[in-house]
């Protein structure tokens, strides 16, 4: 156990050179590129306070898990320890499964769940625990498995956007998908073509991955939270808003709520 805590005990080493900036931090840029995972979740908790109060308080668990992901990733890149690698990868698995159990559309539930989200959530917890055990036993497969999990989520997002007639929501969805594709391209290039990027003197694509995947992930969660209200709360009118100025669509998106009135038209 103790040897797995030792710096450098992970078989994974990203393209950024080790201990070049600080003798205490292995991958300096990769470590501090997780800063968004600490800064934005408290803002999201504030913006989603009405959502958590009236729709699903579990949304705040997801924002807390973002902080856990940031802490785990920073620890891993600072130490390159095997324990750090496992914490990083498994925290991503847990945030993915928490969102899956909360926002997966009921119309796609297998029949044996009887349209019961609590039963579906319990099954998701069991699957997550089993996957966690397998991830500990075979850590080398974790990263590629997690990348694979993002593919069905990506296509589900596209499917839900096609069902939505709101232009503002669709524009955010297109931006989210584009950022996700760019993030995956950064991850793959850093992993597979490190020598090329070293020759270009830019071994920081994994740091860009941290920034881009955070933006894509929280944006996707905002969209799925919006879709969930439209699907499961016909008494509630959801609207996609932006902070700090609603007219600025490159700000921080969130979902605002109010009781639906007979005069309400399409969601905005």
Image (cartoon, helix red, strand yellow):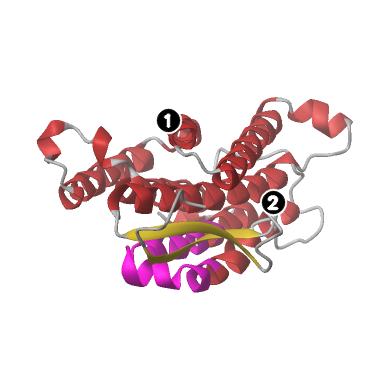
Magenta residues, start to end: 44-70
Magenta span main SS: helix
Going 84% across and 39% down the picture, which residue do you hit? 202
Q: Quadrant of the N terminus?
A: bottom left
Q: Which residue is mark 1?
A: 152
Q: Can you see residue 8? A: no
**Residue 17 or 144: which is nearer the viewer?**
144
Give the numbered dot on residue 30: 2
Does the magenta portion include 65? yes
Residue 179, by quadrant, is top right
Does the magenta portion include 103? no
Q: Position of residue 114 (x, y in %)?
A: 11, 40
Going 47% across and 33% down the picture, which residue do you hit? 140
Q: Is residue 128 above or below residue 60?
A: above
Q: Secondary structure at mark 2?
A: helix
Q: Position of residue 132 (x, y in %)?
A: 33, 45
């Amino acid at each position: 156990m103790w040897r797995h805590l030792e710096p450098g005990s992970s078989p994974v080493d990203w393209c950024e050179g080790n201990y070049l900036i600080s003798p205490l931090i292995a991958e300096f840029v990769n470590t501090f590129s997780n800063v968004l995972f600490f800064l934005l979740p408290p803002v999201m908790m504030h913006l989603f306070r009405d959502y958590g109060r009236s729709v699903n308080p579990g949304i705040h668990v997801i924002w807390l898990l973002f902080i856990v992901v940031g802490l785990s990733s920073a620890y891993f890149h600072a130490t390159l320890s095997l324990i750090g690698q496992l914490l990083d990868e498994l925290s991503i698995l847990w945030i993915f499964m928490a969102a899956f159990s909360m926002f997966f559309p009921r119309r796609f539930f297998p029949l044996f769940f009887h349209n019961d989200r609590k039963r579906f959530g319990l099954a998701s917890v069991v699957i997550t625990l089993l996957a966690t055990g397998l991830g500990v036993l075979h850590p080398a497969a974790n990263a590629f498995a997690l990348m694979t999990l993002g593919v069905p989520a990506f296509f589900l997002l596209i499917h839900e956007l096609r069902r939505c007639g709101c232009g503002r929501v669709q524009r955010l969805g297109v931006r989210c998908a584009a950022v996700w594709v760019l993030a995956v391209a950064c991850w793959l290039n850093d992993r597979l073509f490190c020598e090329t990027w070293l020759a270009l003197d830019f071994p920081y694509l994994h740091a860009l991955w941290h920034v881009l995947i955070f933006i894509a992930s929280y944006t996707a969660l905002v969209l799925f939270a919006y879709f969930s209200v439209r699907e499961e709360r016909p008494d509630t009118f959801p609207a996609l808003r932006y902070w700090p100025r609603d007219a600025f669509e490159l700000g921080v998106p969130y979902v605002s709520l109010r009781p639906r009135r007979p005069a309400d038209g399409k969601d905005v």
